[in-house]
Amino acid sequence: MTAQPNPPPPSDIDLNQVVAYNIREARQLRGWTQEELADRLEPYLGQRLTQAGVSSIERAWDGERRREFDAHELLIFAMVFDLPILWFLLPPPGDHRVMRSTTRPVDELYAWLLGEPQQLEPLYQRLRQLGITDPTTAEETVEKITGIPAAAKQWSYRERRKELLLAILDQHGDGFDKNIDELGRIVDHLRQVGIRGFIAEHTGDEDFTYIKGHNPTLETQPDTGVNETTPGDTT
C-alpha cells in the first residue's frame, strides 16, 4: 500500500497556535520535561495533566488538532514559567504566514502587542490611572500596583518596549539585510540592461529585447518629433 503524502501546511496561522509554540519554547527554556511541567501546572489547574495532555498542548502548534487558550490560562502559564504574558504571544521566528481572518502576516504580531507610536498615548493614559505620572521615565510601577518596594525592581513600559523592539530587530536583522542585498543586485542589473531589457528577460517579449551595446538610458528619452541635423548640414 502506497503511503499517503503529508498534507501541505496551512497557509494561515491563528493566535492559539502561536501560544502552543511558545509553551513548548518556554518549557525547553526552563529545561523541564513534559512530566515536570504537568507537576508545576497542577496547583493552578486543580488537576494533573498527563504527559500526553501536555504533549497535545504543544502539538497544537503544528499538529492536526487545535487547542484554544483563554486569557486565564495565559496568566497561569506566565506564573508557572515566570515569564511575561507577552512571551506567549510573540510570533515564531521565520514564520511569515497570514494571521487567520486577517490580511496581516504573523511576524507583524509584535507590533500589535507592543503598540505602534500613534497607539501609545491611550496606553500611557491607562498607566497614569495606575499612578504612573510620567511614562517616559522609569517609574515605581511595581510598588504602586503591588506594594513591592521599587528598590527591588523598577519598571518602565517605554524602556521595556525599546528592549523588546531591539531584540526583535536583532532576531530579524539578518533576513532584512539579505533582502536589501538582493534588492541592490536587482537595481544594479536594471541599470545595466534598462527597463526594456528587464521586461524582455521576464516576459520573453521580443518587442522589448535589449540590444547588446545599446545604452539603456536612451530608452526612456522621449521622441520630440524634431529631426536632428548636423551643424552646417543644409540638405
Image (cartoon, rainbow, N blue to C red):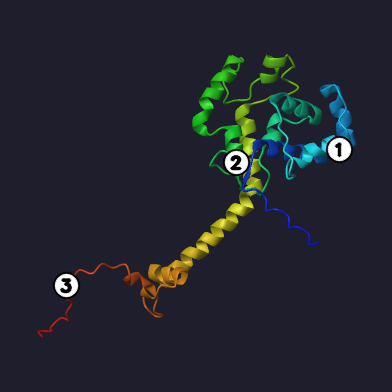
Q: On the picture, is 105 further left or further right than 50?
A: left
Q: Which mark is residue 99?
A: 2
Q: Amino acid at mark 2?
A: Met
User: Which residue corresponds to the image point at 66% horizontal and 47% vertical from the top-left?
Assistant: 171
Q: Give the SS element for disc 3.
A: loop
Relative to the observer, which residue lies in front, 105 or 156? 105
Q: Residues within 10 Å of mark 2 (few under 14, many from 20)?
A: some
Q: On the picture, is 194 further left or further right than 74?
A: left
Q: Amino acid at mark 3?
A: Val
Measure how far apart labels 1 and 3 are at the Cα level. Answer: 82 Å
Please give the residue where the numbered disc 1 appears in the rendered image: 52
Figure quadrant of the C terminus: bottom left
Residue 181 percent coordinates (x, y): 55, 60
Mark closer to the observer (1, 3):
1
Residue 155 percent coordinates (x, y): 67, 25
Q: Which mark is residue 226?
A: 3
Observer able to see residue 78: yes
Figure check: 150 above or below 181: above
Going from N to C along the chain, the mark reached first, 2 or 3, is 2
Where, by quadrant of the figure, is residue 197 drawn? bottom left
User: Which residue corresponds to the image point at 60% horizontal and 33% vertical from the top-left?
Assistant: 114
